Each structure stands twice: as structure tokens, then as C-alpha cells.
Image: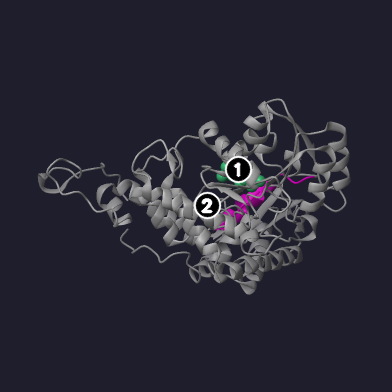
């Protein structure tokens, strides 16, 4: 698509938005963007096509619904709403107050929580607010060490968490890959943390929330569950919930939960005031009310039977994919998965992780590299997005075969420059597979 100057107008009429010109409608969505700014419309359409044309196996991604996208692309984006429903610093908040109340009530009902804050702009913002509510700078926090699967907000020196708090890291057992609860307890006794954090970016099993609660209680620490990844499985009843155990649960709304990009906090009623003040005014300004409304839509979707079926299918698909990848000669960390996610050691194929990710990308298979607890970096992938597309166990088996061939550089087809022998054939097999499961109705060809 050729680059075109934005905001050109036809026939010398005043440009959109100029005095005397009828105000444009907003319901047109993409059509309006296409008319006004073909350059950016081309990027949006191209990205939609990229998402549809490849296998999206990034564990943190998903395809949110058209209803969620409609709320995001609505005039709620115009509204300033500092504060909370009924106590705003701005006028005209009656309707966004309703949207936020619905989001809060739906989140509380969905997760059985006494209190919910739906304003965090991201998962990291939710974790920052949780720490702000419970801790003071310099406090000791016990969390999963970053090389073992901790998130940046769990004590990275490049993140506020590592700069402002004194993090101690626990890990997983070398023999099983499972969290070493004896080590967690010993470190808690030794360092007397003010908070214990459970949750990870790559741990494919369920944390033992009761064990973490017990350890936190023994040393008088708060328990913070960072359930950014599994919260969607929890919503669908396909994973155990930290809500009965943790003082505060932090989450994202855009991973398995399939809502808009954003964060969420859940807590007991006695911590509600501290959590709310930690979000606003301590760490954030005005809420993003279009996102808050989109979160309400997503929570509404997650309360229905179709979402429960999806969440269980995500786990079934991930298990099938993990077993089939093991059959392809890949080493699956912990021997499999209980969640949507798995990590793979590719060193058995004499590959490093970056080369492996590149070979897969060349075949239209998109996933992440990640650190593995003991050894060289590996690959991380998840089954949420492909499950949203409607794929089931037979497609998981097919994906594993295609991935195995891509990683080994096998398969039909000739090789172009920089391609392994089978890249072209595998890429067209991937294209055929994803074409049968479009995430959205495709844009018309002329776009
Ligand atoms: C994804 C994730 C986050 C952060 O989410 P962002 O929205 O990217 O800020 C925090 N903690 C864990 C464990 C995560 O997986």
C-alpha cells in the first residue's frame, strides 16, 4: 500500500473535523481509518493478516472478540475519569461509572473475590500497585528468581521492583522442574520477607497456593499471587484459584482471559481501600474507560458456558501438543503441562533457542524464546490463541509434526536463500492449517 498523506480531503471541501463540516460517525471503525489515513489502515490490515496467516503460539497472546474490540474503539476513549465510581474528579462520569461498576461486579462474581480493581493499565501496573499497597521501599520480598521463571516485576534490577525492594529468589528442583517448596520455606525462614510472590511467566504447572499460604503465614508475610497467565483458566474453572489463599491477586486481562490489554487486582474487603489508593492516585492517573468497559465485556464472556468449554479445551490442547512435541524429540520441561503453556529444551536437536525460533518463524510458526531453569534458553509456547480459533487435538498433533519438521529442516519443497530444505513446504502446510481456522472474518482483498 503506498504511503499517503493523512487527512487529505476530496474536492477541496473542508477536512473532517473543520467547522461547518458534518461531524463524522464513529461506528464505521476500520472504514473510517481507511478513508482518512490509508497508511495506518494498511498497517492495521497487514497486522490482522499477519495474525491470521501464521500459527500464533505466543503463550501470552490471544484473539479478543469483536465485542471487546468494539468497546475499545468507542468514544469511551474520550472520557476522563480520575477516581472511582461515585467519587470522580471529573464531571459527566455517570455512564462510565456504570461501566466500571459492572466490570467490578462481574470480576468479583467471576473469581469469587470480595473486592476487584479493574483500572490497572497492564499486568505490571497491577503488580506495582499490589506492592505499593502492602510494602515500603527496602522491604524484603520472596519471589521466583527471574532465571527460574519470575517476571520482570519479581525483582529484575532493570525494573522498579528490583530497584525499590530487596528480592530473594526461589526456584525449581533440578530433577523434576517443579517448585522446590522446601527451599521456599527455608528462604522464608531465613529472610523473613514482608511478602511472598507466587506466579511465573513460564511455569507450566499449578502453583500449590495452600503451601505458599502456609509458608507466608509461618513468617507473617503477605501472599501476592501474580496470576497474569492462568487467570483465564481460573475464570473458566480449568485451573485452581489463588483467590481463597492470596491477600492480593494480580492479573492481566489479555492473556488466556482473552479481554483487552490491561490489568486486574483482586483482594479481600479489608485491603480494598489500600489497593484502590495504590492504583489511583499512587501509581496511576485517570482510568482508561474504554478498556474498563472492554474488561466488563470480557468478564461477561468469561462467565458463560462457551468460555468454560474453551478454557478446558485450552488445557486439553496444550497437553496434546506437549505430548506430540515430546514424540518429535523435544524435551518438554516438567514432562508436560497442566496449563495453556509449555517450555521446550531444543538442545537435543543440536539447536540454540534463537535459531529454533527463527526456523519456526520462517515456516509461519510464531512463538517465544525463554530462559529455562537449569540449562540453555529454550522455547515457550501456549495453546490459547489456536484454541480460540477453534483448533482441537487433531490440529495439535499436526502442529507438532510441522514444528518437528521445521526444527529439523526437513520436509517437501525447494530451498530459497536462507531457507532450510523444507521451509517452503512446511510454510504452505501451516498456511493451509490456519486458513481453515480464521480468527476473524477476513478483510476484503482490496484493503
Ligand atoms: C504478563 C505478565 C505480567 C505483566 O503483564 P503486562 O501487561 O505485560 O505488564 C506480570 N506478571 C506475570 C507473571 C506475567 O506473566
Tell me if mark 1 has few (under 14), some (14-19) or many (20+) residues whose alpha carbon lies within 10 angstroms of its own: some
> How many marks are shown on the rendered structure?
2
Distance from Cα at disc 1 to Cα at disc 2 = 12 Å
Q: What element carries label 1?
A: helix
Q: Residue at point 14% right, 46% down?
A: 21
Q: Does the magenta stretch include residue 370?
A: yes
What segment carries the magenta color?
A: 353-373
Counting from the top left corner in percent of width and height, residue 88 is at 42, 39
Report the side of 194 relative to 399 (left or right): right
Q: Does the magenta stretch include residue 58?
A: no
* Near-viewer residue (103 or 371): 103
Q: In which quarter of the image is ligand 1?
A: top right
- Compared to residue 75, the image places residue 239 above or below, namely below
- Compared to residue 178, the image places residue 184 above or below, namely above
Counting from the top left corner in percent of width and height, residue 53 is at 48, 61
* Near-viewer residue (116 or 152): 116
Tell me if mark 2 has few (under 14), some (14-19) or many (20+) residues whose alpha carbon lies within 10 angstroms of its own: many
Would the CB of label 2 be found within 8 Å of ligand 1?
A: no
Asked whether the beta carbons under mark 1 and mark 2 sit within 8 Å of each other, the answer is no
Q: Can residue 144 be seen in this view?
A: no
Residue 272 is tagged as: 1
Residue at mark 2: 104
Amino acid at each position: 500500500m503506498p504511503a499517503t498523506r493523512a487527512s487529505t480531503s476530496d474536492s477541496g471541501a473542508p477536512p473532517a473535523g473543520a467547522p461547518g463540516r458534518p461531524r463524522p460517525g464513529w461506528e464505521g471503525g476500520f472504514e473510517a481509518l481507511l478513508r482518512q489515513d490509508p497508511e495506518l489502515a494498511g498497517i492495521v490490515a497487514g497486522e490482522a493478516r499477519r495474525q491470521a496467516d501464521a500459527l500464533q503460539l505466543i503463550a501470552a497472546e490471544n484473539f479478543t472478540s469483536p465485542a471487546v474490540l468494539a468497546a475499545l474503539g468507542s468514544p469511551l476513549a474520550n472520557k476522563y475519569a480520575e477516581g472511582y465510581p461515585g467519587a470522580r474528579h471529573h464531571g459527566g462520569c455517570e455512564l462510565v461509572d456504570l461501566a466500571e461498576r459492572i466490570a467490578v461486579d462481574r470480576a468479583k462474581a467471576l473469581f469469587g473475590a470480595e473486592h476487584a480493581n479493574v483500572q490497572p493499565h497492564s499486568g505490571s501496573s497491577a503488580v506495582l500497585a499490589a506492592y505499593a499497597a502492602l510494602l515500603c521501599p527496602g522491604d524484603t520480598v520472596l519471589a521466583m528468581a527471574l532465571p527460574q521463571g519470575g517476571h520482570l516485576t519479581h525483582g529484575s534490577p532493570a525494573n522498579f521492583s528490583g530497584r525499590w525492594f530487596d528480592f530473594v529468589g526461589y526456584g525449581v528442583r533440578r530433577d523434576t522442574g517443579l517448585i522446590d517448596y522446601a527451599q521456599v520455606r527455608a528462604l522464608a525462614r531465613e529472610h523473613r520477607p514482608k511478602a511472598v510472590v507466587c506466579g511465573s511467566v513460564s511455569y507450566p504447572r499449578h502453583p500449590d497456593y495452600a503451601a505458599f499460604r502456609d509458608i507466608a503465614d509461618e513468617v507473617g508475610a503477605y501472599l501476592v499471587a501474580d496470576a497474569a497467565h492462568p487467570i483465564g483458566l481460573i475464570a473458566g474453572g480449568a485451573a485452581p484459584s489463588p483467590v481463597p489463599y492470596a491477600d492480593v491477586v494480580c492479573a492481566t486481562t489479555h492473556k488466556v482471559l482473552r479481554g483487552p490489554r490491561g490489568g486486574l487486582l483482586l483482594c479481600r474487603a479489608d485491603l480494598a481501600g489500600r489497593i484502590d489508593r495504590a492504583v489511583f492516585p499512587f501509581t496511576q492517573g485517570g482510568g482508561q474507560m474504554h478498556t474498563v468497559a472492554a474488561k466488563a465485556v470480557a468478564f461477561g464472556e468469561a462467565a458463560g458456558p462457551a468460555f468454560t468449554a474453551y478454557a478446558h479445551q485450552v488445557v486439553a490442547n496444550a497437553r496434546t501438543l506437549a505430548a506430540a512435541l515430546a514424540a518429535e524429540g523435544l524435551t518438554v520441561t516438567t514432562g508436560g503441562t497442566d496449563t495453556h503453556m509449555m517450555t521446550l529444551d531444543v538442545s537435543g536437536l543440536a539447536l540454540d533457542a534463537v535459531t529454533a525460533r527463527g526456523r519456526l518463524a520462517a515456516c509461519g510458526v510464531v512463538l517465544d524464546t525463554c530462559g529455562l531453569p537449569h540449562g540453555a534458553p529454550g522455547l515457550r509456547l501456549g495453546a490459547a490463541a489456536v484454541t480460540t480459533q477453534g483448533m482441537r487435538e487433531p490440529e495439535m498433533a499436526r502442529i507438532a509434526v510441522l514444528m518437528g519438521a521445521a526444527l529439523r529442516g526437513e520436509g517437501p519443497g525447494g530451498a530459497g536463500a536462507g531457507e532450510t530444505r523444507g521451509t517452503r513446504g512446511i510454510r504452505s502446510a501451516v498456511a493451509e492449517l490456519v486458513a481453515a481456522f480464521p480468527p476473524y472474518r477476513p478483510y476484503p482483498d482490496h484493503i
